[in-house]
């Protein structure tokens, strides 16, 4: 797609594009800690003290926020953001390349992860400063214009789903996360060669493939090699997320204290969460969750198009409304039905 422009028609500062994948960090830590590791609570408490915190909601006008449905009491909606740097105020003008709304039902038996393509064309509310927003734009412009608070407000406005927590992933440490696990296995869906990479082009052959950190990162960020571009990247991101969760929950990781420590430390070093999120409590609540109970979906779209000189993803408002209404009401059966037919 064409380079994104700010409201003055200028290109934003170019960032390192080698850090593009959404790791469901909190779910990984919760999954690992819930498997009966001796002293897991004390261990996780020591890890939690090193996690970065951010005021995710203070600058979001309460009057503009969706209200929670009574039927959804106990459900959680977590906004997962991945991008260039852990910069909650976006003082550097960075954008979020990965946006996922993770819905965790009240019974905690599953999780539905809905990717919102970064180029989805939506109304972006005014930023707190009043200097940006108040226009239609690519959804990831919200972060560049108003940090995590404006991103929360924009996603809530688009989905009409109230966000409970936010987790932001800085991918500077992503390679180390995968390497700390000893690599992951991903089922490559088609042959291709990466067009841009951390160090050199890589060849990917259809079928199961063992990937180290650099190989998994290239796989998850590639889009130019595919006709459906960013949609292919979303699929591959979801594949790698599942592979990481599967490997993190494997006996080999859990039984090896050094590997487990390396993995958890590498993971927490890359994450920022809102101030209200208690990782220990979340770990306890999600202790029974496994990767086969995670559903991966994409917010409904009508494909790509152009707005002015920008190539954008056009949302499908009717289908998106049905999907996110089901999320808001914590109706998992409806979420699955809509996701299967979208």
Image (tube, rainbow, N blue to C red):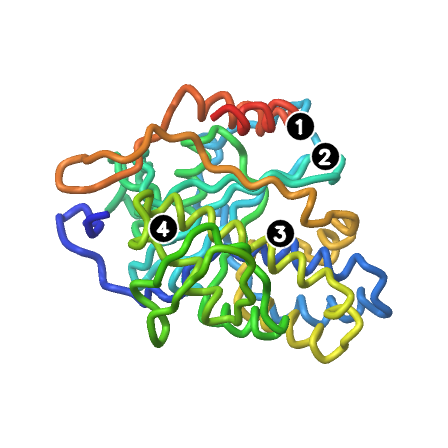
Q: Where residue 276 is drawn, which disc sits there?
A: 3
Please name the residue that numbered disc 1 is placed on.
72
* Disc 4 from disc 3: Cα separation: 20 Å
Nearer to me, 203 or 100:
203
Q: Where residue 143 is drawn, which disc sits there?
A: 4
Compared across the picture, whether 71 is left or right of 211 comes to right
x, y percentage for residue 45? Answer: 74, 67
Please name the residue that numbered disc 2 is placed on.
106
Q: Residue at x 30, y 45 (%)?
A: 227
Mark 2, secondary structure of its residue: loop
Mark 3, secondary structure of its residue: loop
x, y percentage for residue 220? Answer: 44, 58
Q: Nearer the viewer, mark 2 or mark 3?
A: 2
Q: Residue at x 37, y 73 (%)?
A: 198
* Disc 1 from disc 3: Cα separation: 19 Å
Q: Are marks 1 and 3 in contact (CB under 8 Å)?
A: no
Label 2 CA crowd tier, 10 Å (few <14, some 14–19, many 20+): some
Q: Earlier in the sequence, mark 4 or mark 1?
A: 1
Label 3 CA crowd tier, 10 Å (few <14, some 14–19, many 20+): some
Q: Nearer the viewer, mark 4 or mark 2?
A: 2
x, y percentage for residue 131? Answer: 24, 46
Q: Are marks 1 and 2 in contact (CB under 8 Å)?
A: yes
Q: Are marks 4 and 3 in contact (CB under 8 Å)?
A: no
Q: Earlier in the sequence, mark 2 or mark 3?
A: 2
Compared across the picture, whether 87 is left or right of 245 comes to left
Q: Earlier in the sequence, mark 1 or mark 2?
A: 1
Q: Earlier in the sequence, mark 4 or mark 3?
A: 4
* Disc 2 from disc 3: Cα separation: 18 Å
């Amino acid at each position: 797609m064409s380079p994104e422009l700010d409201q003055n028609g200028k290109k934003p500062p170019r960032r390192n594009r080698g850090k593009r994948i959404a790791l469901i960090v909190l779910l990984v830590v919760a999954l690992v800690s819930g498997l009966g590791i001796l002293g897991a609570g004390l261990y996780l408490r020591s890890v939690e003290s090193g996690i970065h915190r951010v005021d995710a909601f203070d600058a979001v006008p309460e009057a503009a926020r969706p209200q929670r449905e009574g039927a959804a009491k106990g459900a959680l909606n977590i906004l997962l953001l991945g991008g260039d740097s852990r910069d909650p105020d976006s003082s550097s003008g960075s954008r979020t390349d990965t946006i996922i709304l993770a819905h965790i039902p009240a019974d905690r038996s599953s999780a539905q992860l809905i990717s919102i393509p970064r180029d989805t064309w939506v109304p972006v509310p005014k930023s707190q400063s009043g200097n940006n927003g108040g226009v239609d734009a690519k959804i990831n412009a919200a972060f560049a214009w108003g940090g995590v608070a404006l991103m929360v407000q924009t996603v809530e406005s688009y989905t009409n789903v109230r966000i409970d927590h936010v987790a932001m992933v800085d991918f500077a440490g992503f390679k180390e996360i995968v390497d700390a696990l000893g690599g992951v296995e991903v089922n490559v869906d088609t042959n291709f060669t990466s067009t841009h990479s951390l160090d050199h082009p890589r060849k990917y052959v259809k079928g199961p493939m063992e990937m180290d950190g650099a190989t998994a990162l290239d796989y998850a960020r590639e889009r130019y090699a595919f006709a459906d571009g960013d949609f292919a990247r979303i699929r591959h991101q979801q594949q790698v997320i599942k592979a990481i969760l599967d490997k993190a929950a494997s006996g080999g990781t859990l039984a090896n204290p050094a590997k487990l420590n390396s993995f958890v430390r590498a993971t927490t070093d890359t994450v920022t969460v809102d101030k209200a999120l208690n990782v220990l409590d979340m770990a306890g609540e999600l202790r029974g969750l496994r990767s086969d109970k995670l559903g991966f979906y994409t917010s409904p779209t009508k494909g790509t198009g152009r707005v002015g000189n920008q190539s954008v993803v056009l949302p499908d408002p009717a289908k998106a409304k049905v999907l996110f209404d089901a999320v808001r009401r914590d109706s998992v059966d409806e979420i699955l039905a809509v996701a299967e037919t979208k």
